[in-house]
Amino acid sequence: MKKRTLALALGLAAAIALPALAQAREVTFTTELKDYGGDGAYVALYLTDADGRYQDTLWIAGEKSKYYKHLRDWARGSGQRSAEYDGLTGASVGSGRSLTLTLDLADELIDAGYEVRVDTAVEDMRDNRADVVVPLTTAGAGQPVSGRGYVQSFHYTF
């Protein structure tokens, strides 16, 4: 009877754990900047719903939070609350350089109307709201998109 109870317990544990593992997908985001001849860029990658409403921060490149206000759409949506970006920050990205991030995203976000947005800003230069806006879809994976400002190219892969 003990073997059966142990097998049942292990089976239940696997049934609970396996769906949780299957609910996240590793996604790599690559943002390549143009050669723009200025200081390092501040870059916000974040998710919005189909109506463009802020949902979640994926990453902030740029270490000085006092400059985050220049990432205007992200700043408005997130309220610049540190809880929105704690642990999700790194160095700014230089002219002509790339930022590559690999994150686990819930499967339910993919093909569900969510968009990945990228805001960019450079000191003493122009700020770019929604430099990139791209639907988070299976069909869009691996498809490069040009930015409207400092972003030369952006794509994501699963």
Image (tube, grey):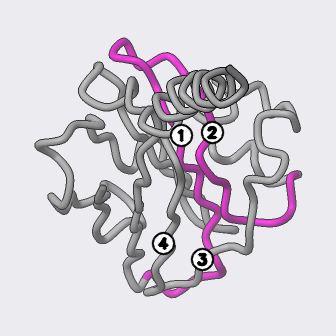
Local packing at callout 3 (Cα closer than 10 Å; few below 14, some 14-19, many 20+) is many
Front label number (4 vs 3):
4
Closer-to-camera residue (146/140): 140
| Residue drawn at x 40%, y 86% as measured from the top left | 35
Residue that mark 2 sits on = 57
Camera-nearest residue between 58 and 64: 58
Q: CA distance from mark 2 to mark 3?
A: 17 Å
Q: How many marks?
A: 4
Q: Secondary structure at mark 1?
A: strand
Q: CA distance from mark 4 to mark 2?
A: 15 Å
For marks 3 and 1, the one nearer the N-term is 1
Going from N to C along the chain, the mark reached first, 2 or 3, is 2
Q: Give the image quarter of residue 84.
A: top right
Picture layout, residue 91 above or below residue 102? below
- Indicate the secondary structure of the residue bearing disc 2: strand
Q: Secondary structure at mark 4?
A: strand
First in sequence: mark 4 vs mark 3: 3
Q: Which residue is mark 1?
A: 46
Residue drawn 41% across the image and 62% down it: 28
Which tag, 1 or 2, sits closer to the chain's start? 1
Mark in the foreground, 3 or 1? 1
Q: Position of residue 42 (x, y in %)?
A: 65, 63
Residue where numbered disc 4 is placed = 100
Q: Are marks 1 and 2 in contact (CB under 8 Å)?
A: yes
What is the CA distance from the residue labelled 4 to the residue labelled 3? 10 Å
User: Range of the magenta residues?
Assistant: 36-65
Q: Which mark is residue 93?
A: 3
* Side of 48 relative to 124 (left or right): left
Q: Quadrant of the C terminus?
A: bottom left
Q: Are marks 1 and 4 in contact (CB under 8 Å)?
A: no
Vertical comparison of 10 with 104: above or below: above
- Residue drawn at x 37%, y 78% is 34
